[in-house]
C-alpha cells in the first residue's frame, strides 16, 4: 500500500515541499495541503515516454481517489506570502496598552501683579507680555506718571529718571543716568536691581515710593 502524502495545490512542481501530515504549505503560508497518492505519478503504459507535456492525456484517477490538484491551480495566481503578518499581530497583542488616562499638568506659577504707591496714587506695573516688555517709566515727562499730582514741579526728579522692567518674570529697577540717582531701601543703585513687594524706592531726593502687590482689580492686597 502506497504512502499518502500531502502537497500544495497552487505551487509549481518542485516549488513546495510535500508533507506526510495534513497542514499548510511552507511557501504559501495560508494554503492548506491536499492529499496526493504517489501512484498517480507513475506514467501509464499506453503513454509514450517522449510524449510532450502539452500532448499527454490525463491519466485516470483510481476509483475513490481524490484528484491530486485543482485543474485550475496552474492558471491561478499564487497568493502573496504573508509570513510576517501573524508575528506582527502577535507582537501587538503582547505589547502593554499605554496609559491613556489624562495626566495632570504642571501647576502654573501664580501671576504677581505689582504697583508703585506714589503720593497716594497707585501706578500699576505693566505686565511682561505687553508690547515693549511691560514695566513702568519714572520721570517728570513720562506718560506713566501723568496721574501723580504735582510731579511736574519736582526739580530733583529728572524728566526720564528710571525704569522698572521685567526680566524672566522678576521685576527690576534701573536708573537712567539721572542726576540725583535712584535708591532701593536706602542704597543708591548703579545697575539693574531686583525689587518686590515691600521694597521702598526713592527717586532723587523728593520722591519716595513703595512697591505693593495688587489683585486682578488693581486694589492693594
Image: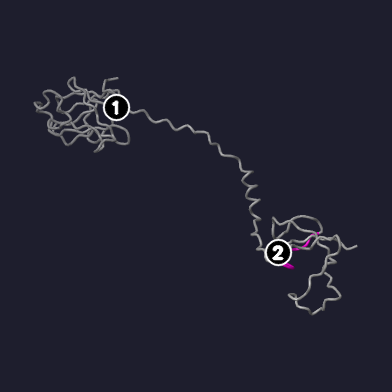
Q: Which residue is at the far bottom?
A: 50
Image: magenta residue range: 12-19
Q: Magenta segment: does it hold 17? A: yes
Residue 195 or 142: which is nearer the viewer? Answer: 142
* Secondary-structure class at tag 1: loop
How crowded pointer 1 is (Cα within 10 Å; few <14, some 14-19, many 20+) is rated as: some
Residue 62 image-quadrant placement: bottom right
Q: Is residue 61 left or right of residue 180?
A: right
Q: Are marks 2 and 1 in contact (CB under 8 Å)?
A: no
Looking at marks 2 and 1 on the same chain, the residue that comes earlier in the sequence is marked by: 2
Q: Magenta segment: does it hold 112? A: no
* Secondary-structure class at tag 2: loop
Residue 15 or 119: which is nearer the viewer? Answer: 15
Residue 213 or 46: which is nearer the viewer? Answer: 46
Q: Is residue 11 left or right of residue 185?
A: right
Residue 176 image-quadrant placement: top left
Q: CA distance from mark 2 to mark 1?
A: 85 Å
Q: Which residue is at the far right?
A: 1
User: Which disc, if any, is residue 113?
Assistant: 1
- Which image quadrant: the C terminus? top left
Q: Residue at x 78, y 78 (%)?
A: 51
**Residue carrying label 2:** 72
Note whether 75 is above or below 56 in the view shown: above
Amino acid at each position: 500500500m502506497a504512502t499518502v502524502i500531502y502537497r500544495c495545490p497552487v505551487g509549481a512542481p518542485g516549488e513546495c515541499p510535500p508533507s506526510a501530515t495534513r497542514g499548510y504549505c511552507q511557501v504559501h503560508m495560508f494554503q492548506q495541503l491536499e492529499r496526493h497518492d504517489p501512484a498517480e505519478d507513475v506514467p501509464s503504459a499506453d503513454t509514450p515516454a517522449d510524449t510532450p507535456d502539452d500532448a499527454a492525456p490525463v491519466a485516470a484517477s483510481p476509483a475513490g481517489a481524490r484528484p491530486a490538484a485543482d485543474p485550475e491551480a496552474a492558471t491561478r495566481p499564487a497568493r502573496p506570502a504573508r509570513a510576517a503578518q501573524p508575528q506582527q499581530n502577535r507582537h501587538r497583542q503582547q505589547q502593554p496598552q499605554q496609559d491613556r488616562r489624562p495626566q495632570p499638568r504642571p501647576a502654573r506659577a501664580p501671576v504677581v501683579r505689582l504697583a508703585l504707591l506714589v503720593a497716594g496714587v497707585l501706578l500699576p506695573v505693566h505686565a511682561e507680555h505687553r508690547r515693549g516688555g511691560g514695566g513702568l517709566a519714572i520721570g517728570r515727562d513720562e506718560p506713566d506718571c501723568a496721574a501723580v499730582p504735582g510731579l511736574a514741579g519736582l526739580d530733583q526728579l529728572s524728566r526720564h529718571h528710571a525704569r522698572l522692567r521685567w526680566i524672566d518674570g522678576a521685576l527690576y529697577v534701573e536708573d537712567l543716568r539721572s542726576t540725583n540717582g535712584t535708591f532701593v531701601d536706602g542704597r543708591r543703585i548703579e545697575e539693574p536691581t531686583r525689587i518686590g513687594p515691600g521694597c521702598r524706592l526713592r527717586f532723587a531726593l523728593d520722591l519716595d515710593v513703595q512697591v505693593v502687590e495688587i489683585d486682578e482689580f488693581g486694589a492693594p492686597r
